[in-house]
């Protein structure tokens, strides 16, 4: 059957259009005045960003769609933050819209930045170098008489791109703190797509934060631009998911190499705030959070690790402040809850309020991790609060608390030696009176409970009512102990079936000084002779 005349006509029209388009594409390099396009792109970009924009060269391709490739592109830095370029990249591609091009006008289509290197700087006073992006766009916009003429080959009527993409970019974030401290993170493998135009931009992104290899994805992103405000003031919204196999390197950069923290991090957060001060909120989970540190007091291996149960935080972040309300985790069969506020500014100040610990086994911390000479075992119940600087824990630790421990054992050798020495001195006195003082050896001591309240101020704990209770005796402790210095100033009273034995314990915990008060044992004995005998005994015991 022969082809009908209308169909032949249609095929002819299509063929003619194809040939026209092909011819037009072939003619693109001739239609586009390269120097004029180069000037157009550089001036428009400079005006929009408020920063000088330059590139080494450009080339034009026609397939699959007409496009301009910019080579050696640089966007200048704000002079207040340095002289190195804010952005550098080898190649940036700008697609040209075909229909306007055929009529002799150049309009920009999609823009793709391939492997850009971007530096974001935050000064000690909180200002960021991106805050001035676009700030000069209004003042630097060319006057009407200076604009390239519309129409004709290479005409300058250019519209803003409807889509901007970053492919495999790298962003270095440098934060300068007061006092000269500097922290630095890198965002690698950055893929970012901006779409839309006018006051509302949509975006989605994916990247890795290093050190730490934390994978971050942003979806459903929106930026609301306002011509009267800077880019950093533009409101944000979106959904952020985070996934980190191990937080070790991420925390190390912020807090230093020791102690070392570990754990796998996941979260889904809602993005808010502004470009310059983003805020997020949502649920974060750390699987098997751990802390590892070399403990000189331990037998081999000296490097010890304490691992908690899954840490969950209903978290929020804004203006360098991370909050978790609540925070929950566990230690063996015990539970730990609280309300956390952590400043990520230098010093890393943390505060935990409404702290609640229930049935947490102390031996996991005092025996297995710290190898503490004054270690005890048993379940801990505690309520209170605590604050500290993560970079100087023992000198800054502060907060009140109420505790109950037990039943358990006193197992630390220094604690056992201290009690034994007190009793030995008391036994020397009681021998003069034929009195009865408990006989303590170096074996673990069973107890029913330890109760009391305390107040910690800048690393020094003070208590007035700490009470150790066991079947043969009770031990009351009042005084102070320094976590950093390990210095103690304690009044100790051992109460047993036939009386009390009181002692003053001072000095360093590694070698305390013990002074027994024999007043509750002595009745009609010459105190001078007893004190002389005690002096000789103390020399042997210390």
Image (cartoon, rainbow, N blue to C red):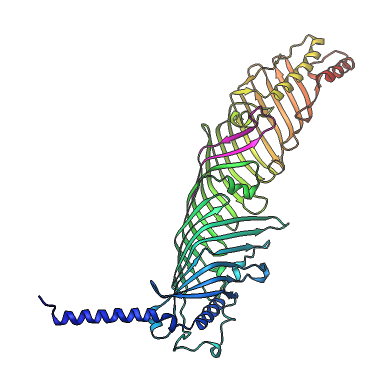
**Residue 295 drawn in magenta:** yes
Closest to the observer, 240 or 477: 240
Q: Is the stretch drawn in magenta largely helix, strand or loop?
A: strand
Q: Position of residue 67 (x, y in %)?
A: 44, 74
Q: Position of residue 128 (x, y in %)?
A: 62, 65
Residue 166 in view in this figure: yes
Outermost residue on the left side: it is 1
The magenta region covers 283-309
**Residue 187 drawn in magenta:** no
Residue 349 in view in this figure: no
Closest to the observer, 23 or 321: 23
Q: Position of residue 13 (x, y in %)?
A: 24, 82
Q: How many marks?
A: 0
Q: Which quadrant of the view contains residue 108?
A: bottom left
Quarter of the figure with the C terminus = top right
Taking the image as shown, residue 305 lies to the left or right of residue 538, namely left
Give above or below for 141 relative to 301.
below
Closest to the observer, 359 or 112: 112
Q: Residue at x 69, y 23 (%)?
A: 413
Taking the image as shown, residue 103 lies to the left or right of residue 468, namely left
Q: Which quadrant of the view contains residue 457?
A: top right
Q: Position of residue 7 (x, y in %)?
A: 17, 79
Q: Residue at x 34, y 78 (%)?
A: 22
Quarter of the figure with the N terminus = bottom left
């Amino acid at each position: 059957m022969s082809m009908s005349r209308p169909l032949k006509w249609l095929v002819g029209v299509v063929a003619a259009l194809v040939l026209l388009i092909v011819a037009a594409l072939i003619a693109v390099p001739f239609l586009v005045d390269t120097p004029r396009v180069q000037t157009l792109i550089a001036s428009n970009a400079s005006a929009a960003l408020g920063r000088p924009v330059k590139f080494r060269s450009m080339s034009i391709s026609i397939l699959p769609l007409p496009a301009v490739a910019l080579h050696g592109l640089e966007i200048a830095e704000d002079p207040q933050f340095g002289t190195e370029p804010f952005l550098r990249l080898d190649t940036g591609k700008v697609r040209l819209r075909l229909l306007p091009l055929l009529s002799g006008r150049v309009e920009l289509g999609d823009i793709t930045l391939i492997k850009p290197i971007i530096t974001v700087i935050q000064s000690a006073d909180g200002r960021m170098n991106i805050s001035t992006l676009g700030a000069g766009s209004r003042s630097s916009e060319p006057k009407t008489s200076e604009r390239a003429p519309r129409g004709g080959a290479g005409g300058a009527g250019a519209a803003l791109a409807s889509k901007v993409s970053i492919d495999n970019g790298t962003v270095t974030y440098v934060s300068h703190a007061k006092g000269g401290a500097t922290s630095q993170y890198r965002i690698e493998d950055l893929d970012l797509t901006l779409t839309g135009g006018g006051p509302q931009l949509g975006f989605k992104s994916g990247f890795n934060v290093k050190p730490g290899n934390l994978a971050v994805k942003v979806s459903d992103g929106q930026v609301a631009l306002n011509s009267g405000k800077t880019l950093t003031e533009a409101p944000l919204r979106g959904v952020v998911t985070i996934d980190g196999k191990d937080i070790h390197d991420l925390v190390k950069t912020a807090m230093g190499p020791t102690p070392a923290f570990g754990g796998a991090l996941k979260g889904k957060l809602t993005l808010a705030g502004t470009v310059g001060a983003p805020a997020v909120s949502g649920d974060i989970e750390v699987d098997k959070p751990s802390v590892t540190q070399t403990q000189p007091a331990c037998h081999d291996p000296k490097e010890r690790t304490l691992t908690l149960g899954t840490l969950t935080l209903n978290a929020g972040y804004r203006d360098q402040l991370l909050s978790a309300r609540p925070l929950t985790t566990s230690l063996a069969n015990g539970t730990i809850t609280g309300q956390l506020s952590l400043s990520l500014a230098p010093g890393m100040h943390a505060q935990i309020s409404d702290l609640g610990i229930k049935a947490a086994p102390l031996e996991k911390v005092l025996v297995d991790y710290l190898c503490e000479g004054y270690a005890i075992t048993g379940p801990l119940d505690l309520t209170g609060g605590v604050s500290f600087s993560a970079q100087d824990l023992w000198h800054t630790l502060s907060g009140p608390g109420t505790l109950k421990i037990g039943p358990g054992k006193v197992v630390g050798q220094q604690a056992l030696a201290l009690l034994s020495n007190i009793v030995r001195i008391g036994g020397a006195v009681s021998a003069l009176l034929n009195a009865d003082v408990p006989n303590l050896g170096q074996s673990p001591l069973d107890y029913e409970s330890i109760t009391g309240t305390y107040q910690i101020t800048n690393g020094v704990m003070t208590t007035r009512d700490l009470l150790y209770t066991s079947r043969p005796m009770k031990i009351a402790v009042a005084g102070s102990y320094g976590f950093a210095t390990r210095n103690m100033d304690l009044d100790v009273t051992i109460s047993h079936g036939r009386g009390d034995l009181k002692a003053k314990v001072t000095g360093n915990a590694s070698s305390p000084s013990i002074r027994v008060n024999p007043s509750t044992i002595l009745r009609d004995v010459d105190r001078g002779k007893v004190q002389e005998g005690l002096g000789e005994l103390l020399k042997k015991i210390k």
